[in-house]
Image (tube, coloured by chain):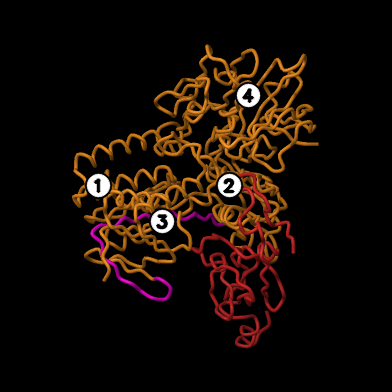
Chain colours: A orange, B red
Amino acid sequence: MKRYEVIVIGAGPAGLSAAAEAAKKGMKVAVFDENAGPGGQLFKQIHKFFGSRANNARMRGFKIGRKLLKEAEENGVEVFLNAVVTGIFEEKEVMVRIDDTVHHYKADYIVIATGAAENMVPFKGWDKPGVMGAGASQALMHLQGVRPGRKVLVVGSGNVGLIVAFQICQVGCDLVAVLDAAPRVGGYGVHASKITRTGVPFLTSHTIIEAKGDDHVESAVIAEVDDHFTPIPGTEKEIEVDTVLLAVGLTPMNQLASNAGCRVEYQEQNGRLSPVTIVDEYGETTMSGIYCCGDSAKETAEGASSAMLQGKIAAEHIAADAGYTTEADAEEKAEEYRKTLDQLSGGMFDVKNKGRMDISTTEEGYPISQSLLRHGYITAEELKGFPAASYEADGPHPVIECTQNIPCNPCRDVCPAGLIHVAEDITRIPEIDYSQKCTNCGMCVTNCPGQAIFIVDNDYEPGYATVSLPYEFLPYPEKGDKGKALDRSGTPVCDAEIVSVRTARAMDNTAFLTMKVPAEFADTARFFRKG
Amino acid sequence: MDSDMRIWEHPVLGKYEKYEEPKVLHFTLDGKDMTGYEGDSVAAALKAAGVMTHRYTAKNHRPRGIFCAIGRCTDCVMIVNGQPNVRTCITPLEEGMELRTQYGVQTKEEWEAENDEEI
């Protein structure tokens, strides 16, 4: 029986981080993953990540995946793919099926990092071809280069639903609407806004009743729901779609932890029971030497950034226990990682605030936009309450439409003029230092993971202003192209002409588009549509 | 062959590796000639060709297609080169593959012969 000091199950962000970190300390590490490719779900993620530099903020998920994999390989981690772990037995014996053969391995430490699976929501016709998980559409689009459908409805407005809905638009599918049974958009307002301004409606307090079609989905019946999530008779509407994407949460995959004898408790999450593997502050389960980290360990999936840090913390503890590092060093490192983890929590979207409907102001005391929560865009009137969004200056200057407390600060890091500030607590809303002058470099606009920053120049020409915006659709407009400017709700408001399209390596495939609009629309024009 | 379901170029990912110098692969679905590209999963090739139904369930004959696309849910299984229950979303397309829509765990003909009933 082959021995490893550490066996990691799952080659996603948590598993690879744990493996790389343990290997760096000199441990002999193997990673088993049932998939043909490593990286877990990271290679499907193409948006720029939130957070701070310490957790790879503004880097796109698939690039983080590449970096992580390289790190693991360089440190001598052995990654076994198409390797299904089918059981964990006494004395940390791990049974793995590779091809059609069962192999047995032994470990001193086991890290379970199996991630989470997409939830389902039952409705009539949910099993028809054309109804699929939001993650499934990402696999088709980003790994296979194939569209999931032509006319798409997204059910669920948490961050996964919002991110995927935007990606559906990016590949040229017709996104018909984003639904949520809750009375408000569940994910970050900035994610919602970048969809809304392209003209896609958010239907909060709406649910899907039926997916219709003979052999596959041809239409969906949706309806408004009341306060108890019950469809209101008479509000049904049938809309033509061929694809329904479900983004209704994730459930941790705890089977191996249960099988190994670790204590798993079931906790209620949004009306369904979700398994939670009980772990200590290092991620160690109730079985000594067996750790669980990343989304597989959580009652609510927290995503790749947290998973990577949890993996590193587990590896520190393992290395200290095995004598590859001192307890003091491990604790110091773990504390540093915990601090970075803490940065990612906090704010109104923190797990502890999930489902809370009573948060009405930001930590700064600004009233939170109700329109943003209800319809996916903030009104011009509401924006006036935010200094960084209503700041006026001569010449080009940033307008930061970041109005919720979310953990993110790349705008500060990329501003060469030192104009943008974010407090040490990165959930704080960015502030503008009025004594500095904007260089119109476009870095804040193109690097903001929420695409919530615009550069406005009210003095472009007599009677005209320019609005510069982030743009991630093909084909890019060209200088001289004429069309309409859309406002935050996606309504065309005025004529617009493209005066420049800038791209740069540091903008990482987000174009910096500048459009000329009549001066009175400088505060409302936020998207460009050709023609 | 060119399908409007293919994303020839992506604003973030650029041109996919498999589309740089695409190599056409030939396969059959229920005896019908079809093509896909090297680098496609079986499911992706079918999706690009506009095929949505991969199988029908055993009891109620309900159509099923791609659901999770990561090899977990088994909704997209088909008969591939004579072997039933193959997860098409994680099976790479190969030249000359013979795909059959799966009825229960059989081909349509097998199912009809065994159940003495036409679908």
Are marks 3 and 1 in one subunit? yes
Q: CA distance from mark 3 to mark 4?
A: 40 Å
Residue A11 marker: 3
The quadrant in which the N terminus of chain A is found is bottom left
**Front position in the image: A418 or A300:** A418
In the structure shown, which secondary structural element does the residue marked by tag 4 occupy?
strand
Where in the figure is residue A143, as x and y percent of width and height? 57, 56
Where in the figure is residue A325, as x and y percent of width and height? 21, 46
Residue A317 marker: 1
User: Would residue A181 be seen by someone viewing this image from the given angle?
Assistant: no
In the structure shown, which secondary structural element does the residue marked by tag 3 occupy?
loop
- Residue bearing mark 4: A455
**Of the residues shown, which amino acid type is indicated by label 3?**
Ala
Q: CA distance from mark 2 to mark 3?
A: 23 Å
Q: Decide which of tag 4 and tag 2 comes sooner along the chain.
A: 2
Callout 4: 10 Å neighbours few (<14), some, many (20+)?
many
**Span highlighted in magenta in the image:** A98-122
Q: CA distance from mark 2 to mark 1?
A: 36 Å
In the structure shown, which secondary structural element does the residue marked by tag 1 occupy?
helix
- Residue bearing mark 2: A164
